[in-house]
Image (cartoon, rainbow, N blue to C red):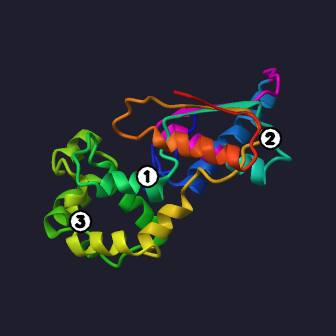
Amino acid sequence: IPDYLGLGDSELFHPYQMAEPNATAIIDMLRTTRVFCEQERIETNNQLFLTGYSEGGYTMMAAHKMIEEEHADEFTITASAPGAGAYDMSGLMSDVMLSGKEYPQPYYLPYVLFALDEYYNLYESPSDYLKAEYVSSLLPLFDGTHSGSEINDVMPSVPMEILKLEMVEEFSNDDDHPLRQALQDNDLYDWTPQAPMRLFHSTGDDLVPIANAELAYDTFIKNGAKNVELYE
């Protein structure tokens, strides 16, 4: 089980819901595991199974994609089973946040926003996106020592209420908005898995709608994938 960038002793900001940096963390761990097994003379059968749930389902999907597209000479995936991942960040998950409805884990929104800014430089100041009261109350809590529950305590139950109204309108009406483009860079549903994959997702998931798995499955099949299943 890999420790993602920005967690543990790392001083980086965790690239939450970002495909490339989290996929590389998994691939680096696989390489290290292979070396360790050789050094310790631990016999393996060379089968590689990938699985993960929620953020883990998303990052596992990213790793599956990166391995097949960039590291097929190094690894062969036997099968994968991504669970409950948010594979459509720019569409379905953005719509969830824009819906104006209460959300059980509102801290997910600033977590994604701060992570994307760390890597894409979305804004000169958080105050470009956030209402003043949330700049002062939220930012200090993303220092690696506070839990999601602690952050939720200062969040409104409708996450988008932390954002300036004009920012929400700009994002909603501009397909080329920098935030939208950054989210699109991290969508994971439009490619073609080669190794067998079974997607798992609960119809009752109130954090990541099952439509994410349905969209990924439908697009994989449309793109010509032969070994993909969706288990609801």
Image x and y of residue 76, in percent? 81, 38
- For residue 92, which numbered disc appears in the image? 1
Tell me, yes or no, whether the highlighted magenta stretch contains residue 223.
Answer: no
Q: Residue sitting at 80 percent across and 22 percent down?
A: 44
Which tag, 1 or 3, sits closer to the chain's start? 1
Residue found at the far right of this picture: 73
Examine the rendering and report whether any part of residue 22 can be seen. yes
Mark 1 residue element: helix
Q: Residue sitting at 16 percent across and 70 percent down?
A: 132
Q: CA distance from mark 2 to mark 1?
A: 31 Å
Residue type beneath disc 2: Phe
- For residue 75, which numbered disc appears in the image? 2
Tell me, yes or no, whether the highlighted magenta stretch contains residue 43.
Answer: yes
Crowdedness near tag 1: few (<14), some (14–19) or many (≥20) residues, C-alpha within 10 Å = some
Foreground disc of the pair 2, 3: 3
Q: Quadrant of residue 165?
A: bottom left
Foreground disc of the pair 2, 1: 1
Q: Which residue is mark 3?
A: 163
Q: Residue sitting at 38 percent across and 33 percent down?
A: 205
From what the image shows, is residue 191 above or below residue 51? Answer: below
Residue found at the far left of this picture: 133
Image x and y of residue 33, in percent? 71, 34
Q: Quadrant of residue 59?
A: top right
Mark 2 residue element: loop
Task: Give left or right: position of 163 versus 28.
Answer: left
- Tell me the magenta residue range: 41-63
Which tag, 2 or 3, sits closer to the chain's start? 2
